[in-house]
Amino acid sequence: MEVGILPVELWRVILAYLPLPDLGRCCQVCRAWRELVISLDNTRWRQLCLGCPECRHPNWPSQPHLEPPSWREALKQHALATRTWTQNGPEPQSSACLLFFRRRKDRRVWHVGPGCEFETLRGALGMVGPYDRVVLHPGVYEEQAEVVLKVPVELVGLGRLGEVALLVCVEQQCPTARLCNLVFMPPWFSTVVYKTSWGHVQLDNCNFEGAQLQIRGPGTCQARFCSFSQGSSAHLLGVVLSLFDSCDFSGSDTASVTVEGPPVSERNWACKHLAALARTFPSCSVSGSYNCPQFAGSTGGHKKVGANAKKESVSPEDFQRRTGVGPACQGTVIEDCWSDGEHSEGEEEKQDGGETINTKNLWKLDYKLPCDHHGLSHLLKPQLDGSLPLASSPDPPSATPEPLTLQQELDRDPVAQMLAASTLGCILRRCLFREGKGGVHLSNYGRARLEGNVFRGLNYAVRCIQNSTIVMLRNEVCECRASGVFLRLSAQGLIAENNIHSNGEAGLDIRKGANPIILCNRIHSGLRSGVVVLGNGKGAIRSNQIFSNKEAGVYILFSGNPVVSGNHIFQGQAAGIAVNENGRGMITENVIKENQWGGVDIRRGGDPILRNNYICYGYSDGVVVGERGRGLIEGNHVYCNKGCGVWVMSSSLPQLLGNYITHNCMYGLAVFCRKDPENIEAREGNWPAQERIGGDEGSGERRGAEGEGREGQENLNEEGELFAWESDLDSEDERHSARRSISVALVESNCINYNGVGLYVKSSEPLNVFANLVNSNRGTGIAVLQSSQLTRLVTNCILENGRGGVTVEKDCRVELRGNGIYKNSGHGVSFSGNGQVLENDVIGNSSYGIQVSGSADIKVLRNRVQPAQGCGIAVLGLVKGNVHDNLLFQGHPKNNKALLHMDPGNEGCVLRNNSVLRHNNSCTSAPPWVLENPPPRPLASSPSGLASSQYPSRLGISMTTRISATVESGCHSGSMFCTIL
């Protein structure tokens, strides 16, 4: 019979009346008939699937409103799964042709119920043969003692689900059994309604109410479309493999699923069949297609770099528009008592009507000394493609790296790849856990795999402890009252592509030596932090999107030591990453942006390695190193933050090496040490959430996993963990072995440009500032307002800043040695403190070269100075000290000011052996003056052959001898904007 005789629509109407076996036969007629039958997917196949009493909607219970891709395929998978329990026969070994002669099992059907063959379940089970079917008619069946299954049997409830209820305790002592369409309730003598220790049980479309399912290895279980309610749970001990598919868990008093003990070595017959079923789940094959939607308010600067990057130009005006920073940012007043905008003496004379020189045309006659080939000039030269390097570009970076996909992460991590492919222990997929205490609990080397589940409204979703291994792929964990996922006591595993959000505590809580791999998750909208690592917790946290959390995106404390790499951490209401209370960690290649507080906050013994991160567009500071903070901060891009680029408290001991600190509205780098009565609470690290935790300043920090000490939730003293964290600190490992030991805060080889002020120091502790490029800042390049101990400024290049090059205020102790101070718009050096100005090149600054004033005690030795206008070296006031062996060059020929000037009333300052070179009046060509022996400073190598710096080698600057001094406890301070955990 040809299909074309009748219209296709009419054939579909006819075929819609056929039962499932007849549809199968029609498919075997010919290809045209097969295609016609398959085309009934949304009609007849849908009716057959939904009408099957042994299953429910394919996307039940978590997404019953969504239709499956194919109803026919869903019905096929259901049919295959329901036959698993019968596949325990021996495999034919002699010949494949024997399959045709293998005898089929003879099955009988027994009916149980009023007026049937048997009235009790126990009576029927005493008569059944292997693989017989027992049909229970509607009613309640109660047994007063345990019922034992000794032969393979199938128990099926007749009618709709809920019409057949069993109040029994069943122990399975046979290889296989199947239970379908039944409601289990606990008998009076036990809460366990079904248990097996070596056979396989298959549960289809069953309800458990206040009951417990118990599976002990090598026994196995396959549960599909089952409901566990009213405190019901599944307890698996030493299982090799069990599968829970599309089950609903609700109202649990403890964990809904408990997996305890390592998988036993013995395997039963069903393991290979369950493993094959597990591999059919779509998420087992990692597609790498996990995408995160874009969020409103996201600024530019978070695109891929290189081949995987999208470029977006970000101008300073655009940044001002996005962040709400107006023109006032351009003229930031640094302090109430001091502003780098104060007029220099030369500028005051110009305003008084004195002779002025047009500084824009000042050097067109080539009278300046050439100084462009200093030791850091390679950082300012255009690149081979003609683009400007970061150090001289007026625009902030326009591209940042994107997180890797899961497939890319698995390709480079064999351990994660092995975990993603593993199918061992308890497998839960497409299940719904809701409105109970706990979801899944693993302990004592337990194994579990969770795929495509939803955890909602629990105390916690997953708890993994005692060397257990968890694999979580594409789950949703939300609205937990405590943290979403807990990992303790050397737990490990893979947590990838999950959506973890809106939890009451941290999204993930890692403690006590737990070491998971956390990849490509979305962790957001939490009421506390996104990820907390503490108590010697470790872990690899890579390529996640962590955003919109109320507290820190990643919080590391109490010797937590994770690897945090390649994440996007943004739009948080507090810090992006906070490292506190002796926390450590390797924090690399992250994009940390648009956070309300500091991008990275380090204090109270925090000692991380912060390397190659993009910290940008923050509403406060980029990096904050607070009280007793440490850490290696190397190679980061810190730009476009509304506060400081890097804010450091002087009682801390960080190493800042090779960072690009650019386009920040206030200071590029600020070092503070003072109390601010106007904002003392914020500056001491107090924050609103401490009111919930109570206590003094330290108690706010010592809150563990973001304050779990509330009633009914976890707290720091659980299992005595708090005291163990403080006494069981790991020794320094290989992550810290390459770090230089220092006793003075170190700022070395950084590029600090296009900020309000380059470097701002108001400190009571020593500070070493070596080999930095400080250029093109709107205000002063380096301003030292308070420095009771020695601040060393050595071999820096301070270039083209909008005001002075270096300003040192009264009573400050500063050593200025080997620097190149070029083309700044104010004085080259304005020095009112105590110290030394040795062997610097001060060339082309618009006002005085070196101005020494006040009652300073200073040595000005062996400098080379050429001002644009004004004096070369001016000694004003009652200055004490020595000014000798300096070489002064005249700038513009029309500059008639004395190159070396000292107030007549000064008797405490000694001038000797200074050389002054002026232009020949008849000369019209450029003078033959050159900076040589040595060449322009800073030098590319130390002429004295002293110890060299190691970080970073690309800057090519060697350091002179460092002065070491102990860092004592200083006064406290805080950033202007940043309030800290």
Image: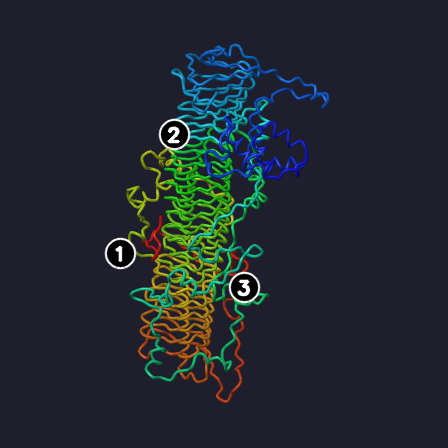
**Residue drawn at the location 70% of the way across and 19% of the way down:** 101
Across and down, in percent, residue 218 comes to: 54, 22
The residue indicated by pointer 1 is 677
Of pointers 2 and 1, the one earlier in the residue sequence: 2
The residue indicated by pointer 3 is 941
Across and down, in percent, residue 303 comes to: 51, 55
Label 2: element kind: loop
Placement of the N terminus among the 4 image quadrants = top right
Label 1: element kind: loop
Of pointers 3 and 1, the one earlier in the residue sequence: 1
Task: Measure how far apart labels 3 and 1 are at the Cα level.
Answer: 46 Å
The residue indicated by pointer 2 is 251
Q: Amino acid at mark 3?
A: Ser
Of pointers 3 and 2, the one earlier in the residue sequence: 2
Q: Is residue 77 left or right of residue 790?
A: right
State which mark lies toward you, 2 or 1: 2
Task: Measure how far apart labels 2 and 1 are at the Cα level.
Answer: 51 Å
Disc 1 packing (10 Å; few <14; some 14–19; many ≥20): few
Disc 3 packing (10 Å; few <14; some 14–19; many ≥20): some
Of residues 539 and 315, which is closer to you in this image?
315
